């Protein structure tokens, strides 16, 4: 399994809906919400970071920045 992490810097304060959408995606291992960040741990063999970005943008959240890291396990 290849575990990756994407950190999204979100403009909106309310991220409740965002967490629900992210957790519905296949391959998501963990989602943590902080002040203006969503830190998402995922299996990059099941889902790619661009699929995560697309899902977030489709529910009208605005991403100001994102960072991706990848670790092989």
Image: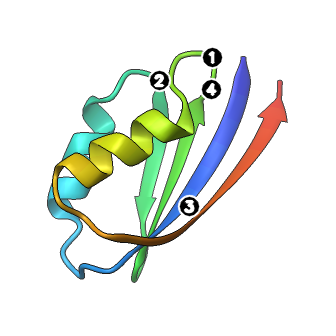
Disc 1 crowd rating (10 Å Cα; few below 14, some 14-19, many 20+) is few
Point out the tag, 2 or 3, that comes first from the N-terminus. Answer: 3
Q: Which residue is mark 1?
A: 45
Point out the tag, 4 or 2, that comes first from the N-terminus. Answer: 2
> Looking at the picture, does residue 42 appear above or below residue 60?
above
> Looking at the picture, does residue 7 appear above or below residue 25?
below
Residue appearing at x 83%, y 24% in the figure? 73
Q: Which residue is mark 3?
A: 7
The answer for how far apart the CA atoms under marks 2 and 1 are is 8 Å
Residue 27: numbered disc: 2
Residue appearing at x 24%, y 79% in the figure? 12
The percent position of residue 39, horizontal first and vertical second, equals: 51, 59
The answer for how far apart the CA atoms under marks 4 and 2 are is 7 Å
Q: Which residue is mark 4?
A: 44
Residue appearing at x 72%, y 16% in the figure? 1
> Quadrant of the rendered structure where residue 32 is?
bottom left
Circles 4 and 2, Cβ within 8 Å, touching? The answer is yes
The answer for how far apart the CA atoms under marks 4 and 3 are is 14 Å
Point out the tag, 2 or 1, that comes first from the N-terminus. Answer: 2
The answer for how far apart the CA atoms under marks 4 and 1 are is 4 Å
Circles 2 and 1, Cβ within 8 Å, touching? The answer is yes
Task: Give SS at disc 4.
Answer: loop
């Amino acid at each position: 399994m290849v575990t990756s992490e994407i950190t999204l810097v979100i403009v909106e304060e309310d991220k409740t809906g965002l967490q629900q959408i992210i957790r519905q995606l296949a391959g998501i291992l963990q989602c943590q919400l902080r002040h203006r960040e969503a830190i998402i741990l995922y299996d990059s063999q099941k889902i790619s970071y661009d699929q995560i970005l697309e899902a977030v943008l489709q529910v009208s959240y605005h991403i100001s920045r994102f960072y991706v890291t990848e670790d092989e396990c």
